[in-house]
């Protein structure tokens, strides 16, 4: 597990991406298919 705010750095080393907001998983996807836009939207509670 790695906790990182730099999306590019996290995607470079991760197999899977999980975004959490207020203790809930708002996004989970393979790192190869997760877009920066989807991660940003999940992190900030916006619709992708």
Image (tube, rainbow, N blue to C red):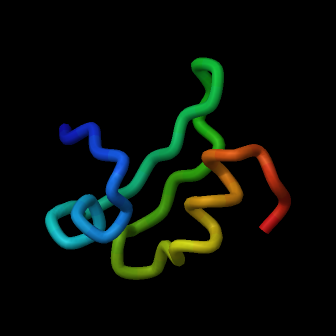
In the rendered image, the vertical position of residue 5 relative to residue 14, given as above or below: above
Residue at the image point whose x is 66% and y is 51% from the top: 42
Q: In the image, 2: left or right of 43?
A: left
Locate residue 17, reporting x and y percent: 39, 55
Above or below, 31 relative to 6: below
Image point 33% across, 57% down: which residue? 6
- Report whether 34 appears left or right of 48: left
Q: Position of residue 7 (x, y in %)?
A: 37, 62
Q: Is residue 44 left or right of residue 18?
A: right
Q: Nearer the viewer, residue 44 or 48?
A: 44
User: At which x and y percent is residue 37?
Assistant: 62, 73
Please, is residue 21 above or below residue 29 in the view? Answer: above
| Residue at image location 19% in from the left, 38% down from the top | 1
Query: Outermost residue toward the left?
Result: 13
**Position of residue 43 in the picture relative to residue 34 (left or right):** right
Q: What is the residue that sits farthest to the front in this orientation?
A: 6
Q: Whole-percent x and y of residue 40?
A: 61, 60
The quarter of the picture where the C terminus appears is bottom right
């Amino acid at each position: 597990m790695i906790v990182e705010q730099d999306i590019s750095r996290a995607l470079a080393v991760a197999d899977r991406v999980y975004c959490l907001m207020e203790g809930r998983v708002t996004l989970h996807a393979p790192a190869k298919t997760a877009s920066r836009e989807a991660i940003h939207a999940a992190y900030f509670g916006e619709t992708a």
